[in-house]
Image (cartoon, rainbow, N blue to C red):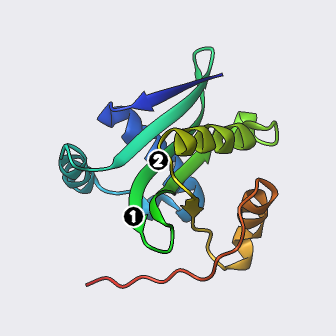
Amino acid sequence: MKLDKVTDKAEIKKYITLLYSELFGASSIPTDEAFEQIFAQLDNPNNPHEAYTLVDGSTVIAFFTLVESFAIFAQGKYGIINELWVNQAYRSQGVGQKVISEICNIARQRHWQRVDVSAPADAKWDRTFSFYQKNGFTFTGRKLKISP
């Protein structure tokens, strides 16, 4: 398996579309116009957002996005997993664990003290929450948002 950084917008769009349609339904997929606005922000050289694929031969078996943030509670820089998708044909085969391992490698290279991920509290996400806990994540509290 090989980890590749993804900069191709069509490829990012493809995997975000697969992830969002599976998790939240087709109505959650950003429109083409919304993707254009998102990609315009990604083009900013100061944007700390990165996308990666995990490839087995010529098959993409996982996709994830990672961003660097900073907080005193984290004692400086830390990472946030924003999206993570595993190809359905490769689930329950240790691919998710391999992705977490690759993310931890990136974190060590960047001297991050932690990597955060959000998992909704709704019971339908219990399997996702359990996956992260089985892979070393600890519960740190609820996450809230506001749309200004």
> Which of the labelled discs sits on residue 117, or is there none?
none
Residue type marked 2: Thr
Mark 1 neighbour class, 10 Å CA radius: few under 14, some 14 to 19, many 20 or more:
few
Residue identifier under label 2: 65
Q: For residue 130, what is the image quadrant?
A: bottom right
133 or 55: which is nearer to us? Answer: 133
Look at 54% across and 46% down and name the residue there.
Answer: 107
Look at 76% across and 53% down and name the residue there.
Answer: 135
Look at 18% across and 47% down and name the residue there.
Answer: 44
Q: For residue 138, what is the image quadrant?
A: bottom right
* In this rendering, position of residue 46 left or right of residue 51: left
**Of the image marks 1 and 2, the number of the one nearer the N terminus:** 2
* In this rendering, position of residue 110 left or right of residue 97: left
Q: For residue 61, what is the image quadrant?
A: top right
Residue 89's place in the image compared with 78, above or below, is: above
Q: Nearer the viewer, mark 1 or mark 2?
A: 1
Residue identifier under label 1: 70
Rendered-image quadrant of the N terminus: top right
Residue 43: image location, x then y, percent = 20, 43
Residue type marked 1: Phe
* In this rendering, position of residue 37 left or right of residue 116: left
Look at 50% across and 47% down and name the residue there.
Answer: 111
Rendered-image quadrant of the C terminus: bottom left
Residue 115: image location, x then y, percent = 56, 57
* In this rendering, position of residue 127 left or right of residue 142: right
